[in-house]
Image: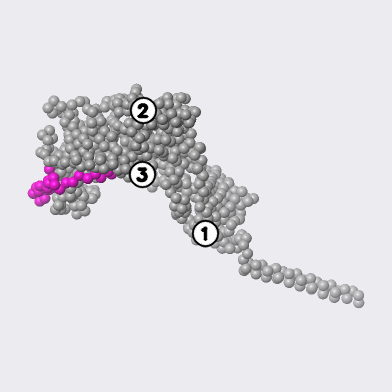
Amino acid sequence: MTFKTNRYSIFIIICLFSFGHFYAQIKTTETPQWVIQQSYEKSPNIDLNEISYGLLTLLSDEQIHIPKKERYIRIVRKITDYVGVQDGSSISINYDPTYQQLFLHSITVLRNGKTINKLNVDDFQSIRQESNAESYIYDGSLNAIANLADIRNGDILDLSYTIKGFNPIHGNHFSGGTTLNDFQPVGKINYYLIANKTLYYKTLNCDIKPKIASYNGYKTYNWTTTLTKTPQFEENTPSWYLPYQDLFVTDFKSWDAVVNWALHIYQDDTKLSEALKSKIEHIKNSTEYEGERISATLKFVQNEIRYLGLESGIGAYKPFSPNKVLEQRFGDCKDKSWLMITMLRQMGIEAYPVLINSAFGESLHQFLPSPKAFDHVVVKVVDSTNTNLFYDPTISNQFGSYKKISFPNYGKALVIKKGVNALEKIKSKNEDLVEVFDTFDLPTVGGPATLNVMTVYRDAEADAVRTRFKSSSLSSISKEFKNYYDNLYDGVEVLKDPVIDDDSLSNKILVEESYKINDIWIPMVGNDKNINVEFSPYSILDIFYSPDEKERKTPFALYYPSHKKHQITVKLPQRWSIANDNVKVNSKSFDFSLKTKMNRARDIMYLNYEYRNKAGFVKPEDFEDYYTKIKEVEQIIAYYVYIPKSESKSRSFEKSFDTEKITSNLATLFFWIAGIVSIVVIGLIIYVVRSNKNRD
C-alpha cells in the first residue's frame, strides 16, 4: 500500500524518537561475575586468502544468564589488510530501549604486544536507524555507534558489552540460538547458557554436542567450536535453505506449547467499538452469502487499512486492539489479521491467526518450537463447507471469488487454534497461469515485421501485474514494455500504447501490445550467407534456468507456482518447408511441450509452447534428471526460419510500387511483344512469297 503521512503518524514517530532518546543512556560496568572468560589464538591456523573485507574474527563469544535476563557479547577481530581498517574502526550495537539497557565493559586494541584502552562512553551516540522503514516497519530499536580513532592494519580489536532485559511478551520462556560457523573461517565461537529450567536443543549440518554442567544451582549448556569451516554455497539456492551449522535452543517442548502461549496474546474478548460494530453490520447487510462476506471483509482490511508497523517491545508480537486499528486506519500484519479475524467471527465465520516465516517457511520443520521462529501473521478461514482458506491481509488489489483468492507460497505455518500441536503445510491452490499469444507478420524476406502481443495473467500473476500497473503511468508502462522487446530485437517501434483490460471478477488481466520490428532478419550464426528470424517463448525463458553443473549438493530453486503457455503465430512471406511436430520433455521437476504446425495453404506457422514447474525446488538427488531434461529443452526451445541472403530481394513479396521493378517489367514485356510481332511479320512474308510461287 502507498504510505501517506498524516499528523497522527508524525506525532507517533516523534513520540517514539523522544521515548528512545529518554532511555538511550549507555553505561559502563565491569564484566558480570557469572561470565566465563574465553581465551583465543591471536594467529590461528587460518588461510588469510579465505578472509573477506580484511577482518578475521578471532573470537565470537555469547553468554546468556536466562534467570537474570542478561546477554553478554564479546567480539575480537584482527585487521589483516588495510581495507579492514574502515569497518574495523566502527562499532554498532543494536538494542531496544523500551525494555533493554546497554552496558559497555571493554574496548581495547592490541598492537605490537601493547594494550590500548579505547573505551570512552562519550564517543558513543544512540541513533534510530530503522532498517525496515522502507517496509513501513518501525521497531523502536537504537544503534549505539562509535568510530574509533587511530586504528591500523594488524590491530586486534576486543569489544565486550552486556544487554540487560528480555522482551516481556515472552514471560519466563526462553528461545535462542546461534550459528556455529560463518561465511568465512572464524578462530573460535563460544555459546554459553545458564538456565533455570530444562532446555531443548538441536543443531543442523553438524553434530557438535554441548558440555552440560551446573552453576550456583542452575544448569549450564556450552557449545564451542574452533577453526570453523565455511558452509557450502551453490548458485540459485532457495532463500529458505539453511547452509550454516545452526543451533536452536528453546524451553518450549512442542508446537502446542507455542500455540498456548499465542492464545493469550490473541484474546477473543474484545469489546467492539460502535464504529467497528457499524462496519461489520454494513458488510452483513450489503452481502447475502458467506463467501461475499469473507471477500468484502478481506478487501476492506487489505485496501482501507494501510500497512504501518510500530513494533517496539511487546508490539513485535501482540496486535493492537481491532478498535484502535480501525480508528487509526493503519496496522501491521498481526493488526490487520486480528482485525479481519474479529470481524469474521462476529459474522459467525470461523477464523484463526496463522504464524508464518516468510523467508524460511519451507524449512520451518527444522526449527525447534519457538515464537521467534515466525515473522509474519496471516489468516485461516474455515467456511461452512469445511474448506480451509488462507488469506494475507497485507496484500492489496486481490480479486476473484473467495475460494480462488491467491495466497503466497509460504510453506509451513502454525495455526493459533486450541488443540493444534503441529505445523500445517499450506499448498497453493492456484495455477498462476500466464498465456502469451504472439502474432508475427513478415510480409517480405529481409524486411521489417509487425508483432502483436496479447498476454493473459491469472490468479497471483494478475494480482502482481495489477499492483504494478496501479503504481505506474501508462507512458512508463509502455516504455517498460518497449525496453523489454529492445532486449530481444533491434529496431523496435511502438505502434500503439498498451491496452489493459482488468476482469476483476475472474481475476484475469489482458494486455495487448503492438510493435514494428525493423531488423528482425539477422545473419545466421555459423553461416553468414543465410539470414534468419528467431522465435522464442520469452515468457518461459524469463523463468527458465539452465545450470552449468550436472551435480549438486543443495536444493535448486525454481519459480513456483508457475504455468506458462506461449503461442507464436507467424505469417510467412512465402511457403517454408516446416514439418508438423509434437515434442514433450517430462522430468520430476517440470513438464515441457512444443507443438509445431504449418498451414501451407496460407503460409502460416504455429508454435505452441507449454511449461509448468511441479515444485518450488529440485532436490539434490533429482538434480541430474533436471539437468539432463532441461538441456534437452534448451536445444529445442528456440525456433528458426532461414533463407540465403541472395533470396531476400528476388523472392520479395512487396505489394508497394517500385520504379525499377516497373521499368524492368515493361522492358521485358516490350521485348516479348517485339519478338512476337517480328515472328508474325516474317511468317506473313513467307506466306506471301509461297502464295505467289504457287500462282506461277
Identify the magenta region: 106-131
Give me the disc on residue 272.
2
Identify the residue under disc 1. 518
* Residue 164 lies in the magenta stretch: no
Give me the disc on residue 4.
3
* Residue 117 lies in the magenta stretch: yes
Q: Earlier in the sequence, mark 1 or mark 3?
A: 3
Q: Residue 607 in the image: x percent, y percent?
A: 54, 47
Q: Amino acid at mark 1?
A: Asn
Q: Residue 16 in the image: x percent, y percent?
A: 25, 40
Residue at (13%, 41%) from the top-left corner? Answer: 27
Residue at (15%, 48%) from the top-left corner? Answer: 123
Q: Which callout, 1 or 3, points to the residue nearer the camera?
A: 3
Q: The C terminus lies in which quarter of the figure? A: bottom right
User: Which element carries disc 2, helix, strand or loop?
Assistant: loop
User: Which element carries disc 3, helix, strand or loop?
Assistant: loop
The reply, left or right, for residue 292 in relation to residue 217 is right
Q: Residue 412 in the image: x percent, y percent?
A: 36, 32
Disc 3 crowd, CA 10 A, few/some/many (<14, 14-19, 20+): few
The reply, left or right, for residue 678 in relation to residue 129 is right
